[in-house]
Image: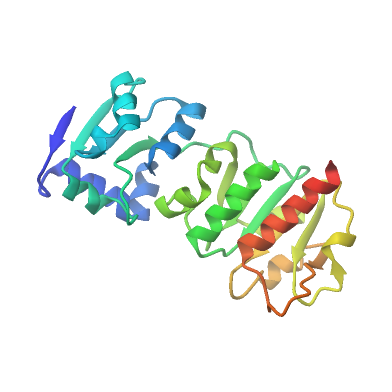
């Protein structure tokens, strides 16, 4: 266990770079988990993290103190002054604990016969994390993200997904039209101008749900590969739905029909 109080400390600089740089996370294949909930979710599926970083005040919290005391196979523990820890975290109220882990690999290869969720240019990490959380809750395991999606393993996306990452196969930088070209199920996208309504569909067969960019929607080359375009009925005066809300509605209508 080591204590760090200087911004000039080499290890602190490395931690800060990992926190702030998506390029650094991709290069090192390391992921930053902020908060006990994410850490416990990771441990449940993959075991002990490589390193745990706690603030001085965080180390005094009962839950964190118990976790450190039990050790749980942790290789390294760093205690940072509260000021340094606050420099690392991206939340207004610091959790007091973070963990560094290797980015989990997908447990399964792409499956062109089973259910899938395709995300085309989802830019907001909060939306992406919310969709991942809904996917895990609805039992959809396979997700494909286009090249221009937000980074799936960024701290903001991880926080929004609340541990859902560790229940999913998340394939980043995917060629969505190529996947759909060989897909054997039914590919469906939501569109405001579609004539078919969501609740009129038969959703019992394998399907690929396609959700697009918050402002531009699904790119034309992806849309052309979909067999169906559907709209979510909105009797109110709202023009459109947030993409994460639309995804949740579609996924849980699928769950309802299959039950």
Q: Quadrant of residue 47?
A: top left
Residue displayed at 79% across by 53% down: 253
Q: Residue furthest front?
A: 62
Can residue 5 be seen?
yes
Figure quadrant of the C terminus: top right
Figure quadrant of the N terminus: top left
Q: Vertical placement of 247 versus 233: above or below?
A: above
Q: Quadrant of residue 211?
A: bottom right
Q: Quadrant of residue 108?
A: top right
Give the side of residue 232 with respect to residue 132, left or right: right
Residue displayed at 19% across by 38% down: 56
Give the side of residue 205 with respect to residue 178, left or right: right
Q: Residue 90: image x %, image y %?
A: 33, 55
Q: Vertical placement of 221 versus 178: above or below?
A: below
Q: Residue 103: image x %, image y %?
A: 44, 39
Q: Residue 173: image x %, image y %?
A: 54, 54
Q: Nearer the viewer, residue 143 or 156?
A: 156
Tell me which colouring the rendered structure shows.
rainbow
Residue displayed at 78% across by 46% down: 255
Residue displayed at 39% across by 37% down: 36
Give the side of residue 243 with respect to residue 209, left or right: left
Q: Residue 236: image x %, image y %?
A: 74, 76
Q: Nearer the viewer, residue 233 or 192?
A: 233
Give the side of residue 99 with respect to residue 223, left or right: left
């Amino acid at each position: 266990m080591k204590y760090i109080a200087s911004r000039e400390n080499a290890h602190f600089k490395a931690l800060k770079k990992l926190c702030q740089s998506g390029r650094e996370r991709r290069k090192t294949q390391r992921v930053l988990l902020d908060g006990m909930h994410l850490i416990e979710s990771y441990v449940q599926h993959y075991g002990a993290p490589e390193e745990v970083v706690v603030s001085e005040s965080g180390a005094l919290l009962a839950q964190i103190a118990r976790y450190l005391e039990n050790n749980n196979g942790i290789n390294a523990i760093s205690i940072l002054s509260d000021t340094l820890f606050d420099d690392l975290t991206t939340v207004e109220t610091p959790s007091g604990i973070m963990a560094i882990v290797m980015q989990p690999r997908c447990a399964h290869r792409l499956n062109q016969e089973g259910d899938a969720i395709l995300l085309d240019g989802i830019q907001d990490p909060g939306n992406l994390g919310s969709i991942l959380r809904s996917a895990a809750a609805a039992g959809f395991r396979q997700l494909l993200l286009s090249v221009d999606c937000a980074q799936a393993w960024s701290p903001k996306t991880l926080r929004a997904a609340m541990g859902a990452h560790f229940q999913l196969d998340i394939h980043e930088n995917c060629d969505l039209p190529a996947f759909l070209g060989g897909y054997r199920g039914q590919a469906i996208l939501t569109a405001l101008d579609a004539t078919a309504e969501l609740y009129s569909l038969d959703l019992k067969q394998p399907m690929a749900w396609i959700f697009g960019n918050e402002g531009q929607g699904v790119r034309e080359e992806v849309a052309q590969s979909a067999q169906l375009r559907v709209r979510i009925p909105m009797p109110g005066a709202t023009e459109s739905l947030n993409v994460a809300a639309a995804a949740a509605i579609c996924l849980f209508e699928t769950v309802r029909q299959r039950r």
